């Protein structure tokens, strides 16, 4: 199936790869499931707050307990379960969280 072009920031939850925040570049539905490609992508390893719906609307609480990855582009995520539109306020909060480093 041809990828569906789209724009805007989203929160993506996948079956095996975790949770991501990024700019939705494309979405493809295949027999094996939904795949997306995100630009300006941040993996959310651990966050403080409630459900992903609330994270997409408000962002995360505090900064100390959150653990987010470095940003990536052209990040392909397979096995997508959920795609939630992300508010500008949420994206701003997530971008302000310091990147987790070893």
Image: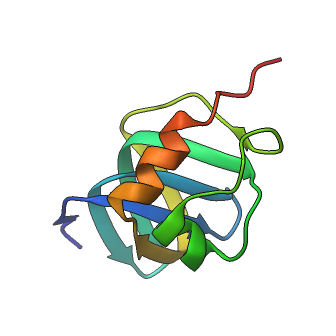
Report the front residue among 29 and 90: 90
Say how the picture is coloured: rainbow
Look at the image and tell me in which quarter the N terminus lies.
bottom left
Look at the image and tell me in which quarter the C terminus lies.
top right
Residue 92, placed above or below residue 24: above
Q: Residue furthest top?
A: 102
Taking the spot 58% from the left edge, 75% from the top edge, the residue there is 54
Relative side of 87 to 25, left or right: right
Residue 23 visible in image: yes
Which quadrant of the view contains residue 50? Answer: bottom right
Query: Residue 69's spot in the image, x, y percent?
Result: 64, 34
Residue 33 visible in image: no
Taking the spot 68% from the left edge, 77% from the top edge, the residue there is 51
Residue 47, placed above or below residue 95: below
Which quadrant of the view contains residue 97? Answer: top right
Q: Residue furthest bottom?
A: 31
Taking the spot 67% from the left edge, 56% from the top edge, the residue there is 17
Query: Residue 92's spot in the image, x, y percent?
Result: 43, 46
Residue 26, placed above or below residue 45: below
Relative side of 98 to 72, left or right: right
Tag count in the figure?
Answer: 0
Report the front residue among 76 and 20: 20
Taking the spot 74% from the left edge, 54% from the top edge, the residue there is 47
Query: Residue 23's spot in the image, x, y percent?
Result: 32, 51
Query: Residue 96's spot in the image, x, y percent?
Result: 53, 35
Relative side of 84 to 66, left or right: left
Report the front residue among 14 and 93: 93
């Amino acid at each position: 199936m041809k990828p569906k072009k789209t724009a805007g920031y989203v929160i993506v939850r996948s079956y095996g790869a975790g949770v991501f925040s990024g700019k939705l570049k494309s979405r493809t539905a295949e027999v094996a499931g939904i795949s997306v490609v995100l630009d300006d992508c941040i993996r959310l390893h651990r966050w403080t707050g409630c459900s992903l719906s609330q994270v997409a609307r408000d962002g995360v609480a505090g900064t100390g307990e959150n653990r987010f990855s470095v940003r990536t582009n052209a990040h392909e995520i397979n096995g997508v379960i959920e795609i939630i539109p992300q508010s500008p306020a949420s994206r701003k909060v997530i971008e302000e969280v310091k990147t987790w480093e070893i």
